Image (cartoon, rainbow, N blue to C red):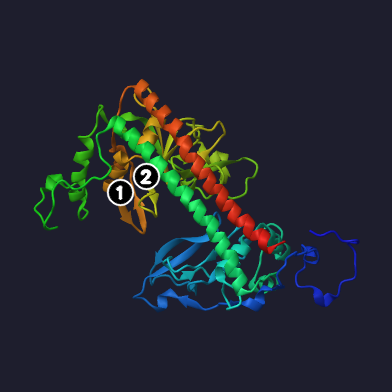
């Protein structure tokens, strides 16, 4: 906050908009663009719809991810829902008035399914004097977040209603200048995307090379028999899943199994134990006696991402008979059993930290017999088409999610060479992966530069 010559000063009673002294210590905004109240450029959208008023219509309800500051979650709601929801149209924005200071801000895009959001959110649209994406990016800037914090009320739980939000002053270039700033931003993002593609191509090449060491499987698998009709006579004894087309897809598994160059093992044959994670609500704030909990979002590209964590009480991860029942150990194999994306269900990683962590319910932990298999070897194979194709056959869809149960994961088969050969393959993978990581680091740098340049252009 800006320094003042005296904390005690005469203030007109009529100037009080919130009973919080910080309102008189706003950050000074430095910008080459006109600084104006946001309310001049916004329209508060307050229309609500009660889903039960339209019993024949299914509604998709949006949510906002604090991690990426975008709408990223949706759930189908039917006519039984009595609560009223805000309507959200394309290019409208919404924020959680109690979580805006941690990034709970979203913009509705055309690609995103869904048009309703919880009434707890503040919803607004932009006039033709400000581009929605420009405003959304500005709201994600570090300096703008300081302005938000200076405008919120409360101590533990901050609150920012629309009227106070609309009174915040911020730089507003002309629409032409806004578009130029956005073009520069997207140019950096395009550079980042190019590096991601290069890294992915590099990684895929590594994985196919590893796969060729243990299997003769090619990149693409086709059904061995074309089916002229979905209606066929199938023996009852062969029906393990009552799902249309499953047995047809299952024919692809034979091609995979016949490609193995080493003895075949099921995951259940390799494990010493497995255990579902905890169904306990976690907190963003770490308090005394709490430990971090790994979630689906922490399993990224075959590794654990420790950058965004939640916490829960340590005693949730224990019981009397087994004090460390849900505490992770080095070498634990974690696999995602459910995800909204079919390509992400079944993603895995190895826990290799010396710190105390637990894990959430949508993850399953496996501990393997290391006399037979090394966890890193299993994890590498879980990224190859050799296993991804098996997951594609086994996964099922329900409630907007793709799922794998423990029996299906346990039935996944992989070729198991000797431990020395596994060690060679692991070394080969990690030595080569450094090349892919160079591109991923460049992509991360470009994305950060895109945001930094955007903020510097506006707030300087």
Q: Which residue is mark 1?
A: 395
Residue under the point 81% across and 60% down = 2
Residue under the point 66% across and 61% down = 457
Q: Is residue 294 above or below residue 457?
A: above
Q: Is residue 144 above or below residue 436?
A: below
Query: Left or right: 145 with respect to 283?
Result: right
Going from N to C along the chain, the mark reached first, 1 or 2, is 2
Looking at the rendered structure, the secondary structure element under dot 2 is loop
**Residue 282: x percent and y percent?**
54, 49
Residue 244 at least partly seen: yes
**Residue 18: x percent and y percent?**
75, 70
Q: Is residue 352 above or below residue 249?
A: above
Query: Left or right: 121 with respect to 265?
Result: right
| Circle 1 Cα neighbour tier, 10 Å, few/some/many (<14 / 14–19 / ≥20) | many
**Residue 164: x percent and y percent?**
69, 71
Relative depth, front residue between 204 and 323 = 204
- Do the residues under discs 1 and 2 have CB atoms within 8 angstroms? yes
Q: Which residue is mark 2?
A: 346
Residue under the point 49% across and 43% down = 439
Looking at the rendered structure, the secondary structure element under dot 1 is loop
Quadrant into which the C terminus falls: bottom right
Residue 294 at least partly seen: no
Query: Left or right: 12 with respect to 64?
Result: right
Residue under the point 60% across and 73% down = 176
Quadrant into which the N terminus falls: bottom right
| Circle 2 Cα neighbour tier, 10 Å, few/some/many (<14 / 14–19 / ≥20) | many
Determine the image quadrant of residue 380.
top left
């Amino acid at each position: 906050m800006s320094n003042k010559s005296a904390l005690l000063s005469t203030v007109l009673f009529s100037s009080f908009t919130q009973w919080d002294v910080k309102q008189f210590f706003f950050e000074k905004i430095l910008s080459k663009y006109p600084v104006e109240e946001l309310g001049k450029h916004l329209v508060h959208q307050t229309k609500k719809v009660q889903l039960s008023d339209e019993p024949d219509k299914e509604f998709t309800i949006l949510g906002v991810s604090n991690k990426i500051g975008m709408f990223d979650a949706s759930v189908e709601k039917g006519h039984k829902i009595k609560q009223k929801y805000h309507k959200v149209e394309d290019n409208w924005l919404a924020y959680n008035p109690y979580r805006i200071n941690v990034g709970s801000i979203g913009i509705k895009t055309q690609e995103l399914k869904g048009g309703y959001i919880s009434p707890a959110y503040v919803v607004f649209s932009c006039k033709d004097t400000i581009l929605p994406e420009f405003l959304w990016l500005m709201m994600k800037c570090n300096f703008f977040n300081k302005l938000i914090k200076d405008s919120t009320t409360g101590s533990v739980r901050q609150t920012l209603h629309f009227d106070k939000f609309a009174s915040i002053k911020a730089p507003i270039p002309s629409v032409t200048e806004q578009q130029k700033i956005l073009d520069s931003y997207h140019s950096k993002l395009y550079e980042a995307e190019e590096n991601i593609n290069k890294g992915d191509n590099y990684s895929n090449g590594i994985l196919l090379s590893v796969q060729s060491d243990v299997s003769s499987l090619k990149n693409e698998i086709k059904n061995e028999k074309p089916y002229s009709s979905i209606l066929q006579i199938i023996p009852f004894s062969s029906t393990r899943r009552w799902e249309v087309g499953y047995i047809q897809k299952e024919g692809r598994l034979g091609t995979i199994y016949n490609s193995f160059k080493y003895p075949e093992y099921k995951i259940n044959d390799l494990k010493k134990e497995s255990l579902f994670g905890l169904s306990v609500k976690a907190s963003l704030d770490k308090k005394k006696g709490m430990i971090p909990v790994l979630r689906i979002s922490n399993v990224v590209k075959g590794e654990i991402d420790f950058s965004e964590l939640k916490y829960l009480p340590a005693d949730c991860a224990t019981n009397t008979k087994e004090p460390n029942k849900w505490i992770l150990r080095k070498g634990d194999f974690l696999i995602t059993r459910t995800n909204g994306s079919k390509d992400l269900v079944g993603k895995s990683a190895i826990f290799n930290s010396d710190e105390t962590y637990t894990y959430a319910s949508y993850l399953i932990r496996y501990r393997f017999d290391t006399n037979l298999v090394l966890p890193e070897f299993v994890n590498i194979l879980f990224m190859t088409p050799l296993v991804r194709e098996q997951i594609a056959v086994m996964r099922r869809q329900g409630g907007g999610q793709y799922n794998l149960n423990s029996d299906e994961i346990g039935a996944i088969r992989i070729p198991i060479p000797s431990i020395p050969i596994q060690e060679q393959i692991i070394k080969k993978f990690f030595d080569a992966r450094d090349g892919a990581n160079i591109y991923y680091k460049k992509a991360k740098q470009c994305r950060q530069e895109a945001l930094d340049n955007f903020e510097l252009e506006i707030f300087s």
